[in-house]
Image (tube, rainbow, N blue to C red):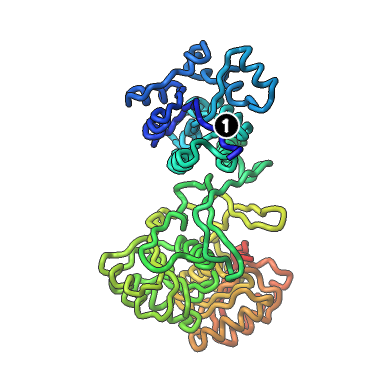
Amino acid sequence: MSDLIPIKRALLSVWDKEGLVPLADALTKAGVELLATGGTLKKLQAAGIACRSVEELTGQKEIMGGRVKTLHPVIFAGLLARRDNPDDIKSLKADQIDLIDLVVVNLYPFAATAADPDKSDADRIEMIDIGGPSMIRAAAKNHAYTTVLTSPAQYGQFLSDWEAHGGTTLDQRRACAAEAFAHTRDYDVAVASYFVAEGAFPKSLVLRWEQVSELRYGENPHQPAALYRDTEADPSVASLLDAQILGGKELSYNNYADLEAALELTLEFDTPFAVVLKHANPCGAATAGTLAEAYKMALEADPVSAFGSILGFNRVIDLETAQAVYDTKFVECVLAPGYSPEALELLKKRKQRRILSLPAMAKRAYPGRTFKFIRGGVLAMSPDLYSEPDLTAVEGCTVTPEQEASLRFAWKICKHVKSNAIVLAQGTRTVGIGGGQTSRVDAVKIACERAGADAKGASLASDAFFPMPDGPQMAIDAGVTAFIQPGGSKKDPEVFEVIKKAGVCMVTTGRRHFRH
């Protein structure tokens, strides 16, 4: 191969020493001269591997507690020299500088140190690597001749390819350079983010993800898709990427989207709660004294829509609940903080059903920002955490404690239904949901039709104000006796008049829950 470069000299300087000794041993056995710094040198010498110190090469001792050790012309000339450039080679010979063919460097753990609450600002500053990124970038820039490795995960493939060819190919070096520049990019972003003044929305927003896996396809089979992890995500926030899949097929793009909706809803409740979802919309939800009872009530709300559903629970699933889930036809996924051994054994009998365990659901922590991508940009906002509003009753209206509890339950569910959203509840179970409609009257109509006879005496939640009195009137005609809505419409006086005339109750929250 005309682009094959043999490796005669390697420089090793790593914080993460996993796989270091086997790599160095393979190199020395092939006759490669090793250079190393500080802790890396000590590690190799302790393993009996011959290695020269960088100090010996440069003639300059490490100074300032190790802050300056590799920042030297001898190092960077050896990394950056172009071997087909006569002037570069002439400069090397004039100063008796040797070429460096391989650089193995990984960086100080800045991100982990910055995230550690027990570390001081001074500790974090010391974890800002200077020489490491400089060497990585120099070697990657000169990848036509120099190979750079930045992760122990690369060592095995590198050794296999190198031993097979007797050197490194340009394709191999270019691939390593791509990983190297991505590595320093991510590192610099982490450092830069640390120095951004605290605030909900900084002037410069950097979003970084690393691929977790490719998915079978996206929303539709003709769309390729992949799953990425937010490298800056708060580890205290429950994430589906941390869920353990205990049974069933791999998750699809749509599964993840629906499970995220289920996760968000389960975080709203402290008492035993179950939700049945389709297309990221709840079609039934309930709280009860037991998890099994909550699930049965949630399923009864709309059993037809439950076909092919996603189930979410905020408690460890016991055998009674598992039996009810097992008996439900065509459930795609089940998400819960955990499962009793008997429950898991039963649920796993449905071989195609995905079973996910996410203990972190119990923490109820929320992300600092949420995002929605648009072409050429991204929308960022704080999460909608407004679930326990102060209620203002319409003049002349008295809300009973039972009605208030039902209204608050419906309000929480309504927050997670696509706008325009209407939720009907009896106690703490939904009986009819109308979501994703372009008309609020249509949403009321759908919710009442799904509730049927259960609309009589039900509580209704609306995610935004009623622009006209026709929606409330339709619900009153169906038997609804209590309403919760943000208020704020120009037609509020007309809406309130309909409420008073019917002798039913309405409370306003002062805030809406649009979910587009």
In the image, is 21 to the left or to the right of 185?
A: left
The correct choice, above or below, for 272 with respect to 231 in the image is below
* Viewer can see residue 190: no
Q: Residues within 10 Å of mark 1 (few under 14, many from 20)?
A: many
Question: Which residue, given by chain and number where applicable, does mark 1 sit on?
Answer: 146
Give the x, y percent position of residue 188.
Answer: 59, 35
Q: Quadrant of the C terminus?
A: bottom right
Give the x, y percent position of residue 429.
Answer: 45, 75
* Viewer can see residue 38: yes
Total marks drawn?
1
Most distant residue in the right direction: 490
Give the x, y percent position of residue 231.
Answer: 52, 46
Tell me which amino acid carries mark 1. Answer: Thr
Helix, strand or loop status at disc 1 = loop
User: Which residue is found at the position 64% from the left and 20% from the top?
Assistant: 89
User: Which residue is found at the position 50% from the left and 27% from the top?
Assistant: 8
